[in-house]
Amino acid sequence: MHMNLSLGPLQYYWPREDILAFYEAAASWPVARVYLGETVCFRRHQMRLPDWLELADRLAAAGKEVVLSSQILIEAEPELKVVRRLAGNGRFLVEANEWGAVRLLVKEGLPFVAGYTLNVYNHETLGVLADVGAKRWLPPVEMSRDTLAALLARAPAGIETEVFAYGKLPLAYSARCFTARHYNLPKDDCQFRCLDHPDGLLLSTREGEPFLTLNGIQTQSAGVYSLLGELDSLRALDVATLRLSPQARHMGKVVEAFQAAIAGERVAADALARYMPGKPVDGYWHGRAGQECAKEHAC
């Protein structure tokens, strides 16, 4: 199976002009698929659904497969309305990132992508999703290679596997906004401080060691997960797509490095590390602590 690259949905809050410039550049990158939409916080309003749809049309015209990603934590009716509009967009495949979105898409009889936040940990659950229309799925980001191999050995036929292969790991979501709390602001009057942190707000231990990244209601890893050195094991599992998560700077260089590795070129780990907004990690893939980087592998 030929392995390709996807560009995951933007996890951060950037100014509108920066978002548009990013995707204008992405139109020429060697990624087969681009996921679009606000997945983290409904208050982020630089881009609304009509803007994402207009951008989707442009990227589709540039030859990209476009998928619209649903919000991960739905708390109120206005957010649910957006999910309904996604389900009824009439053109683009939707990535369901919570089970309410799955229900709406199944009700409409539409195929969909099962996002990693659906927390599929066994082949039975994956089989249920495949039966109701999932064409592609993503394992939870903390799933190890061995666990994934065991699951795929009994997976239903015909469903593609896409793996989160680069970026700060999305670890948890909360009704509370941690970025607003950092600035002693209420969530409903956050003053959109996430705009000040295009790759999230680093949280360190008392000893000064990077520990986590705060991104509004989302908690991420401090390190940057990279499976660049794991292409052989990913191919052995018949993984179809590697997902690269957007970052504020040097994303084109990241895409180039992964594409070169897929093409069989040797890409040194330090060549990629200098473009990362954090130290490289790959512990979860090896069944270890997520913040570790396996010594015998290039992160």
Image: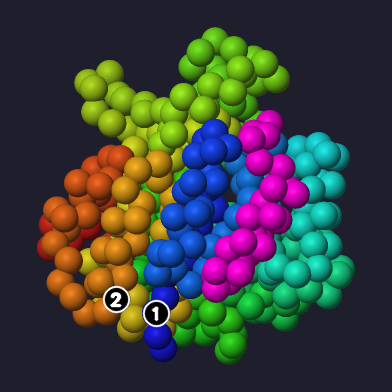
Q: Residue at x 78, y 52 (%)?
A: 83
First along the sequence among labels 2 and 1: 1
- The answer to which quarter of the image holds residue 206 is top left
Query: Which residue does the numbered mark 2 point to in the structure image?
Result: 262
* SS class, disc 2: helix
Evaluate if marks 2 and 1 touch, with contact meaning CB atoms under 8 Å apart.
yes
In the rendered image, which quarter contains the N terminus? Answer: bottom left
Per the rendered image, the range of residues in magenta is 43-69
Return the mark for residue 21: none
Task: List x then y, in percent, for residue 85.
Answer: 82, 55
Q: Is residue 260 left or right of residue 168?
A: left
Q: Nearer the viewer, residue 282 or 54?
A: 54
- The answer to which quarter of the image holds residue 3 is bottom left
Q: How is the image coloured?
A: rainbow
In the rendered image, which quarter contains the C terminus? Answer: bottom left
Mark 2 packing: few (<14 Cα in 10 Å), some, or many (20+)? Answer: some
Q: Is residue 65 magenta?
A: yes
Query: Which residue does the numbered mark 1 point to in the structure image?
Result: 3
Three-letter amino acid code at disc 2? Ile
Task: List x then y, in percent, for residue 219.
Answer: 48, 37
Q: Is residue 134 magenta?
A: no
Q: Residue at x 49, y 17 (%)?
A: 182
Q: Nearer the viewer, residue 15 or 231?
A: 15
Three-letter amino acid code at disc 1? Met
* SS class, disc 1: loop
Q: Residue at x 25, y 71 (%)?
A: 260
Q: Is residue 126 left or right of residue 84?
A: left
Task: List x then y, in percent, for residue 138.
Answer: 53, 66
- The answer to which quarter of the image holds residue 198 is top left
Task: List x then y, in percent, for residue 64.
Answer: 55, 70
Quote the CA–CA distance across marks 2 and 1. 7 Å
Instruction: Relative to 152, say whether 51 is above or below.
Output: above
